[in-house]
Amino acid sequence: MTSTRSDEQLLAAWRAGERRAGEQLFERYYEPVARFFFNKTDAGAELIQQTFLACVEAAGKFRGEGSFRSFLFAIAYRQLCRHYRDRKGERIDLTEVSVAAMEPSPSQVMVEGEELKLLLAGLRRIPVDCQVALELLYWEQLTTAEMAAALEIPEGTVKSRLRRGRALLREAIEALARSPDLASSTLMGIETWAGALRARAGLPAGSGEK
C-alpha cells in the first residue's frame, strides 16, 4: 500500500527509528532513480544500490532546506559522475563528453515508438550535464530550484544548461532521424514522449511540479 505521508514525514519517522518509513521512501523513489540511470550507463543496477546506500549514510545531513527528491537526485548525480570518472579518468569533462562517446550501448528499458527511441538516442549524444538537466526536467518534472539543488549549481546555470541542451538535442535528433518528418514529430512531441516514459514506469503523466 502506498503511504500517504509526505517525503519529509517519512524521513522524520525513519530518523526516529521507524524502519518501514525508510522502506516506503525507497519504494516511492526506486523508479525515478532507476529512470535517472537507465539511458546513461550499463551499470544502472549497481548505481541504484549505491545511491540508496549513500542516502542511508547521508540521511542525517538532510536539513530540509530543499525537497527530499532533489537531495536524492544529488546523490544519484554524484554516483554517476564518480562512475564515469572511475572508468574514464578524473580529467573527463562532463560539460563536453556525451554518454554515446563513453558507453555506446548502455542498458535501456524496452520502449516502443520511433520518436521515443530517437529522443533517447539524441539525449545520449549531447553532453552529460545537459542530458541530466533535460531528463530531470522531462522525466521527473523537477523545478529549476530543485534541479539547482540536485546538481549543486546556481539556478541561472540550470537555465543555461537547459537552453544549451535543447539546442544540442535538436541538432542531434535532426542528424539521427531517418526523415525530417520524424525529427519534427519527435521535437514537437517531447512532452508526449516524456509522459509515455513516466507512464511506463508507473507514474501519472503530468504529475510533477511546475
Image (cartoon, rainbow, N blue to C red):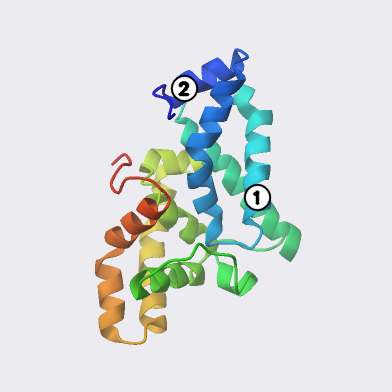
Q: Which element carries disc 1, helix, strand or loop? A: helix
Q: Which element carries disc 2, helix, strand or loop? A: helix
What is the spatial separation of the Cα atoms under label 2 and label 1, in whole angstroms? Answer: 24 Å
| Left or right relative to 99: residue 188 | left
Residue under label 2: 8
- Which residue appears at 35% of the width and 52% of the height? 199
The image shows residue 183 at horizontal and vertical percentages of 31, 78
User: Farthest residue toward the top?
Assistant: 16
- Which residue appears at 50% of the width and 41% of the height? 150
Looking at the picture, which amino acid does disc 2 mark?
A: Glu
Residue under label 1: 47
Looking at the picture, which amino acid does disc 1 mark?
A: Leu
User: Farthest residue toward the front?
Assistant: 1
The one of 88 and 109 positioned closer to us in this rendering: 109
Mark 1 nearby-residue class (10 Å; few <14, some 14–19, many ≥20): many
Mark 2 nearby-residue class (10 Å; few <14, some 14–19, many ≥20): few
The image shows residue 180 at horizontal and vertical percentages of 28, 85
The image shows residue 149 at horizontal and vertical percentages of 48, 38
Q: Is residue 98 visible?
A: no
Task: Relative to 121, say whether 29 is above or below.
Answer: above
Rendered image quadrant of residue 184:
bottom left
- Of mark 2 and mark 1, the one earlier in the sequence is 2
- Which residue appears at 66% of the width and 44% of the height? 49
Q: Which mark is drawn over residue 200?
A: none
Q: Is residue 81 visible?
A: yes
